[in-house]
Amino acid sequence: MRDRIRRTARAGLVAGVALAVTAGLAGSASAGTIVKIRVSGGTGTWLDYGDRVECHDTKADGYGVRTYAESKVRGEWWMQVASCWGGKDDLQQSGNAGFTEGADVKVKVCYIKRGVGDVRCTAYRHAKA
C-alpha cells in the first residue's frame, strides 16, 4: 500500500511539473532556432542538431508517453521541456528557451499510466542540440 501511495504521489509530481514547464515555455517561446532531438539513438549517443525526437505511445497497455529534455547549464541539468503528448512525434523548442545549437542535452522518456500513477522511465540518452 505504501509503495502504491509513493508511486501515485511521484506520478502526480511529474505530471504537475510537466504541465507547469510546458505552460511556462509556451508563453515565452518566440521566433528562433528550433532544436529537435531524436530519442531513438542508443544510450550515450550524441545526436546532431536538427534531429527529430521520436516518441511512440504504448497503446494497448494504457501508458501515455512524455518526453523530458533537459539542457546542461553551468554544469547542472535543468528541465526545459516536457512534450510528446499522444500522437505528437517530435519535440520542438525555440533556442531562446534553452536549446541553442551546440548545447548539451539529455532526454528521458517516461510512460505514465493514466489513473494509476505508475511511472516507467528509460535511461537518460545524451544528445547535442
Image (cartoon, rainbow, N blue to C red):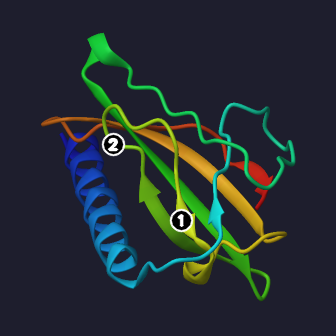
Q: In this view, does 96 lie to the left or right of 82?
A: right
Q: In this view, does 124 lie to the left or right of 13?
A: right
In the image as oriented, which residue stretches furthest toward the bottom? Answer: 74
Residue indicated by mark 2: 85
Q: Vertically, is 35 above or below 44? A: below
- Mark 2 residue type: Trp
Q: What element carries label 2?
A: loop
How packed mark 2 is, by other alpha carbons closer than 10 Å (few <14, some 14-19, many 20 or more), is some
Q: Residue at x 72, y 45 (%)?
A: 51
The image quarter containing residue 111 is top left
Q: Which residue is drawn at 38% across and 25% down?
A: 57
Q: Which of the marked residues, 2 or 1, is nearer the chain's N terminus?
A: 2
Residue at mark 2 to residue at mark 1: CA–CA distance: 15 Å
In the image as oriented, which residue stretches furthest toward the top? Answer: 60
Q: Residue 93 shows which numbered tag?
A: 1
Q: How far from the left and from the top, in percent, is residue 73?
A: 72, 83
- Mark 1 residue type: Gln
Q: What element carries label 1?
A: strand
